[in-house]
Amino acid sequence: MQTNPTYRASRSRLSGRGETGLDRKTVHKYLSAPSQAAPPRRSPTVSGRYLSFAEREEIALLRAQDFGVRQIAGRLGRSPSTISRELRRNASTRTYDLQYRASVAQWHAERRARRPKAAKLLASEPLREYVQDRLAGAVQAADGLALDGPEVPLWKGRNKPRRQDRRWATSWSPEQISRRLEVDFPEDESMRISPEAIYQALYIQGRGALKRELVACLRTGRSLRVPRERARRGIHGHVTADVLISERPAEVEDRAVPGHWEGDLIIGTSRSAIGTLVERTTRFTMLLHLPPMDGFGLGPRVKNGPALAGRGAEAVKDAITATITTLPEQLRRSLTWDRGTELAQHAQLTIDAGLQVYFADPHSPWQRGTNENTNGLLRQYFPKGTDLSRWDLAELQAVATTLNNRPRKTLGWKTPAEALNQHLLSLQEAGVATTD
């Protein structure tokens, strides 16, 4: 603890009652206290993420001069929301006075930063019961009786259960629970909890206010939490700046010029897949046959080994090349794909097929709306949860022909086959006219 630097010099001078009127014990207590001329010793700021004591002093000075939140933020190079939150959270409130003092604010910040902290759901039983009931409460019939729902297997902690019955529960999301608390308990500040605190109670070991298996009541049902930052990085290395959808020619947007395609994979069980190519102007559909490669299923999977299931980058590149090169060059202008790694060899595809490849933005399926709509139509023939590797090339071509012979409202009730054939005839006529 930092003591007053004049303590030793003043002790003898102020030891009696003559000059101060105080007894020796009081004087000793005063001189041993932290100096008022300098801030008390505090842990150094680890990073620029948190406000430092010097910044809090600056905030207090500017606030006393009636500077606004945005003016203070500009002076400190901080976000206005950071300053606003600091003034709201760390102002002095013991005397119901919202005057901001740097020393008090620093004390509040350090108090909140102490670790470990007891989970709020552990400390408050009414809050824990409320959260658990809204998350995992029973589904009730109109007469109020609880419904058991389907019988579900014992929870084993496996991630995102698929193709099986799930537990019936009220299944409010953490955000719904957090916001509803403010409605149900408007005057009770103890009945408050953030969505993140609920997620941590479910996913982080040691915060065990809620049972781990209650993650099955969340919409996703995933047993492991994947941070968003981890999901953003490292998996789209094949997408470079020159193949982003923003670099795509403007003629693609208005659909006036045929030859621009959208593509994707529809996925089945046992790692099976079918590739889809849809022409944006005519809605003409072509399907890619992606059979399993030799050796698939004959042994254990090899980490980072070849994609023997048939939907790897090389297999998809070869299938697109073999299919798209059956068309005239004028109908092979561009291909817009999602960010799946199955098209990691797009540079070689451009060389082999003369087809410029572009990739849509993350989580933006509307940028390939024609392809998404077509995939929905194809699910009538290839439902989810089925093995797609059992269909051969002839059967895929038959389904594609069926779709291409359906009249479309967007084409004036022409079929995609008729629209494409009309364009091919116009190309031939233009070629004859040029030759003449």
Image (cartoon, rainbow, N blue to C red):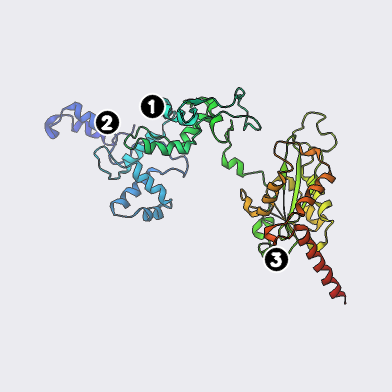
Task: Give x and y (percent) for residue 186.
Answer: 34, 38
Q: Which of 149 and 82 is in front in this view?
A: 149
Decide which of 44, 31 is in the foreground and name it.
Answer: 44
Residue denoted by label 1: 126
Question: In this rendering, is residue 158 above or below 399?
Answer: above
User: Could you tell me which residue is drawn at 64 percent across and 54 percent down?
Assistant: 367
Could you tell me how far apart the alpha carbons at marks 2 and 1 are, in whole angstroms? 45 Å
Report the label total: 3
In contact (CB < 8 Å): disc 1 and disc 3 = no
Per the image, label 1 sits on a secondary structure element best described as helix
Amino acid residing under circle 2:
Ser
> Nearer the N terminus, badge 2 or badge 3?
2
Element type at marker 2? helix
Q: Say which amino acid is labelled 1.
A: Pro
Position of the C terminus by quadrant: bottom right
- For residue 32, the mark is 2
Q: How far apart are marks 1 and 3 (CA)?
A: 63 Å
Give the residue at the far right of this rendering. Answer: 436
Residue denoted by label 3 = 256
